[in-house]
């Protein structure tokens, strides 16, 4: 496969590390001078931008999601609104979302990272690219759109939903490449099968950019066997810019562009993990303008390797996300915290505080069931009332979480009680 930016993508590893260090110092200097948040942290850690190395850098405490939330809406921004050309908003957990801003250069770097990533699995200007990610506040849609457009592919901004029309487009306008969530691709495969459409025979689709939710290599292989579509995993977060690291043709991890991001993997004690060893992702963006992202601990668990990749790119590769280091759940691509559900349950006097969240994914479509139980004082055998009460809780959950959860209202004392650290989540989803 050709490269998008060969000089950078194949730069010898030692040169890349040197470049990372000088970009890191430059970024720290910029933020030290413009961001009170970073300034105070560097002072406390006794760090001077120009003298910082990868070791002393680790003295800086992690940035976490709460830092972005607590400075809502724009407390971390270091450029005036005049210089911002876009904002995205990611879902919040307690009513307050996270707002991320972009300068022209930020958008440009984001687009560049996706143009490199998509080129690495064969997207070219000859492709017709059907983008089934949601366009809007979520970064997936516009990210994929601009990346593919920069390559020169023909982009169809199909957005989410309306599966029949998606399939019609796939067949009618020579679509070669899809972008979307893996679960939606399985849904498309299923609807095609039900309607006697053979994706191999009846369309030109052979590859896809897939992400926005957890999935596995075996799901990827299954999709290929079923449809002939080779799907490539994409990882990122709106706090970085958006999705930006993509699996190359080798499909052995997503290249993390080392000139844009310095990624550390740390263990539970905060010590660096060995090459290929699993730990928590800590990301530092090296060329960010609108707001700093320095030692950001996103909560995802994975491993990073600098081992040489068969594609010729020298940038390290990130394995699939294998879990979370906090209690956040990702359901249908949306972040859900058990504490949000607990909060909703607390709003209803007729419920006791006990609950269980069960996650399943028939045909890789996430489903969430919340089991709750009656407060004994409100117990009733009026079934109509019971149904109305369940519905009330269900509606409120939808309002708070932005996704549908099925609510089952049980008898007092029907749910298991837990000693010590409560475990409320039963995740039965399988990505095999
Ligand atoms: Zn590669």
Image (cartoon, rainbow, N blue to C red):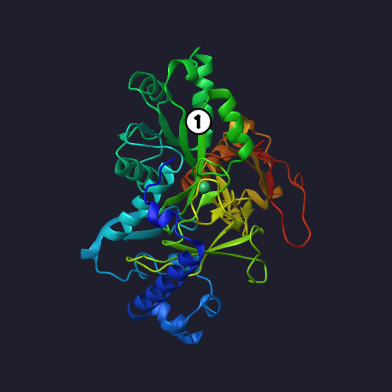
Return the residue found at the far top: 196
Residue 110: name its quadrant: bottom left
Residue 408 visible somewhere in the drawing: yes
Pinpoint residue 330: horizontal percent, then vertical percent: 56, 48
Question: If the image is split into quadrants, where does the C terminus sit?
Answer: top right
Q: Nearer the viewer, residue 206 or 17?
A: 17
- Label 1 secondary element: helix
Above or below, 395 relative to 102? above
The residue at 51%/35% (across/down) is 231
The residue pinned by badge 1 equals: 185
Residue 384 visible somewhere in the drawing: no
Does the beta carbon at disc 1 come under 8 Å from ligand 1? no
Pinpoint residue 385: horizontal percent, then vertical percent: 59, 35
Q: Nearer the viewer, residue 234 or 206?
A: 206
Pinpoint residue 336: horizontal percent, then vertical percent: 55, 50
Return the residue found at the far left: 82
Question: If the image is split into quadrants, where does the N terminus sit?
Answer: top left
Instruction: Count numbered badges in the picture.
Output: 1
Classify 10 Å Cα crowding around label 1: few (below 14), some (14-19), many (20 and above): many
Relative to 338, 68 lies left or right: left
The residue at 46%/82% (across/down) is 42
The residue at 58%/45% (across/down) is 252
Pinpoint residue 168: horizontal percent, then vertical percent: 38, 20
Above or below, 381 relative to 116? above
């Amino acid at each position: 496969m050709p490269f998008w930016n060969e000089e950078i993508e194949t730069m010898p590893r030692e040169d890349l590390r040197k470049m990372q260090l000088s970009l890191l110092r430059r970024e720290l200097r910029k933020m030290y001078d413009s961001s009170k948040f970073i300034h105070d942290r560097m002072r406390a850690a006794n760090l001077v931008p120009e003298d910082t190395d990868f070791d002393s850098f680790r003295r800086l405490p992690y940035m976490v999601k709460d830092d972005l939330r607590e400075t809502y809406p724009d407390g971390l921004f270091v450029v005036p609104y005049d210089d911002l050309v876009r904002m995205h908003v990611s879902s919040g957990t307690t009513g307050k979302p996270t707002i991320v801003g972009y300068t022209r250069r930020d958008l440009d770097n984001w687009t560049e990272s996706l143009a490199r990533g998509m080129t690495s699995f064969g997207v070219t200007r000859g492709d017709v690219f059907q983008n089934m990610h949601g366009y809007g506040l979520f970064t997936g849609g516009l990210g994929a759109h601009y990346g593919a457009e920069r390559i020169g592919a023909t982009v169809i901004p199909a957005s989410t939903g309306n599966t029949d029309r998606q399939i019609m487009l796939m067949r009618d306008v020579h679509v070669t490449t899809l972008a979307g969530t893996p679960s939606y691709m399985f849904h498309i495969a299923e609807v095609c099968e039900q309607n006697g459409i053979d994706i191999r025979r009846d369309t030109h689709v052979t590859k896809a950019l897939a992400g926005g939710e957890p999935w596995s290599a075996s799901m990827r292989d299954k999709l290929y066997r079923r449809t002939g579509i080779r799907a490539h995993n994409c990882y990122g977060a709106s706090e970085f810019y958006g999705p930006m690291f993509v699996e190359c043709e080798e499909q052995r991890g997503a290249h993390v562009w080392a000139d844009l991001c310095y990624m550390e993997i740390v263990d539970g004690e905060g010590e660096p993990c060995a090459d290929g060893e699993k730990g928590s992702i800590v990301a530092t963006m090296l060329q960010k303008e609108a707001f700093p992202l320095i030692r950001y601990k996103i909560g995802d668990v994975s491993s990073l390797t600098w081992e040489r990749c068969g594609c010729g790119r020298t940038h390290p590769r990130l394995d699939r996300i294998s879990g979370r280091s906090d209690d956040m759940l990702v359901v249908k691509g949306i972040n859900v915290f058990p504490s949000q559900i607990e909060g909703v349950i607390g709003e209803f006097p007729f419920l006791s505080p006990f609950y269980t969240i069960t996650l399943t994914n028939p045909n890789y479509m996430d489903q969430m069931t919340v089991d709750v139980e009656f407060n004994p004082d409100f117990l009733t055998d009026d079934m109509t009332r019971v149904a109305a009460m369940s519905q009330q809780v269900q509606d409120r959950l939808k309002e708070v979480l932005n996704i549908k959860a099925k609510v089952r209202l049980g008898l007092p004392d029907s749910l298991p009680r837990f000693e010590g650290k409560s475990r409320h989540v039963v995740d039965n989803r399988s990505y095999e």
